[in-house]
Amino acid sequence: MFDLSGRTALVTGAGQNAGAGIARALATQGAAVAVNDLVAERAEAVAKEVTAAGGTAVPVAFDVTDLDGVHDGVDRARALLGRHLDILVHNAGIAADFGQGHFRTLDPSRWRAPVEINLFGAMNCVSAVIDEMCEAGWGRIVQISSGSARTGSAHGLSLYGAAKSGVEGFVRHISQEVAPLGVTANTLALGLQANAAGDSNADIAARIPTRRLGTPEDVGAAVVYLASAEAAWMTGQTLNLNGGSVTY
Ligand SMILES: NC(=O)c1ccc[n+]([C@@H]2O[C@H](COP(=O)([O-])OP(=O)(O)OC[C@H]3O[C@@H](n4cnc5c(N)ncnc54)[C@H](O)[C@@H]3O)[C@@H](O)[C@H]2O)c1
């Protein structure tokens, strides 16, 4: 089960943490992976690590917020992998200008970055691969989101939450348009990850039913399922992956 041999995948923001875990997991299941990151050295390091472990991976640096850059990057990925893309995982989602702070304290110049990377980033990436998936009659789109999309908090995440809510809606609608053509689209909404180091992480982990924060391996395993042939009847869904911290 969950054999991805012969499939190709693009994972955005895969130069570290969750994205790197996704790239490693897809490659372990046999997919040839295009490892994207804004920072070329990170993409190269992860692709090298995957290759050293016996997988197939190529680095493709580009900025997901730049439509032309995304299309160029996807062209490069296809050329390097020798095949159209079967699987897209849009994981890049935390902009350098991460919108911390209560909304009323934020200058309007900071409103756009979270929307650019999460929502326009998803549109840019989906636009680059969706035709070939539909023409091939097989495709998997996996969007990485956050519990912040559906649960409000006073942690200064209003812009991020708005952007993640927006992309969840985008994926839901896309899923309906392409389902008859063999393409699925789902969202994985993550709870707090261990890499998001903060002073209160230990307190947060203690309140999670499974008593720990998420890991790249947790995320990679869930993406493997959503990317697999076996998940053909799973589409249009937002799935929580959060150690049981929210159960709606
Ligand atoms: N870390 C958490 O606790 C947490 C919780 C819930 C959801 N998420 C979501 O999980 C995903 C991954 O989070 P993470 O903590 O692993 O992120 P991270 O910041 O550790 O890594 C993201 C990678 O994306 C790259 N990147 C940034 N902007 C980019 C762009 N414009 N184009 C291409 N690449 C770009 C960065 O260089 C970085 O290597 C994000 O979508 C995030 O919103 C994270």
Image (cartoon, rainbow, N blue to C red):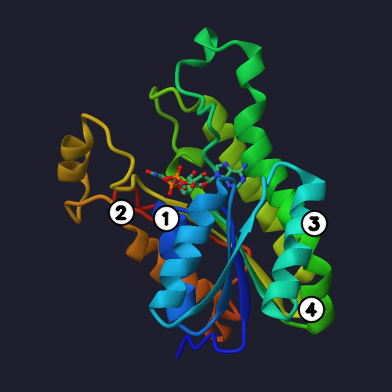
Taking the spot 74% from the left edge, 53% from the top edge, the residue there is 70
The Cα atoms of the two marked residues, 2 and 1, are separated by: 9 Å
At horizontal 79% and vertical 83% (from top left) the residue drawn is 136
Mark 1 lies within 8 Å of ligand 1 (Cβ measured): yes
Which is nearer the eye, 248 or 91?
91
Q: In the rendering, which numbered label is found on residue 18? A: 1
Of the image marks 3 and 4, the number of the one nearer the N terminus:
3
Determine which of the numbered discs, if any, sits on residue 181 in the image. Answer: 4
Q: For residue 202, say whether it is visible.
A: yes
Circle 4: element type: helix
- As shown in the figure, which amino acid type bears the numbered disc 1? Ala
Residue lying at 19% horizontally and 56% vertically, measured from the top left: 210
Q: Residues within 10 Å of mark 4 (few under 14, many from 20)?
A: some
Q: In 3D space, how far apart are the residues under numbered discs 3 and 2 (Cα atoms)?
A: 32 Å
Q: Is mark 2 within 8 Å of ligand 1?
A: yes
Cα–Cα span, label 1 and label 3: 23 Å
Q: Give the side of residue 234 with respect to residue 78, left or right.
A: left
Q: Of discs 1 and 3, which sits in the foreground?
A: 3
Amino acid tagged 3: His
Residue placed under numbered mark 3 in the picture? 71
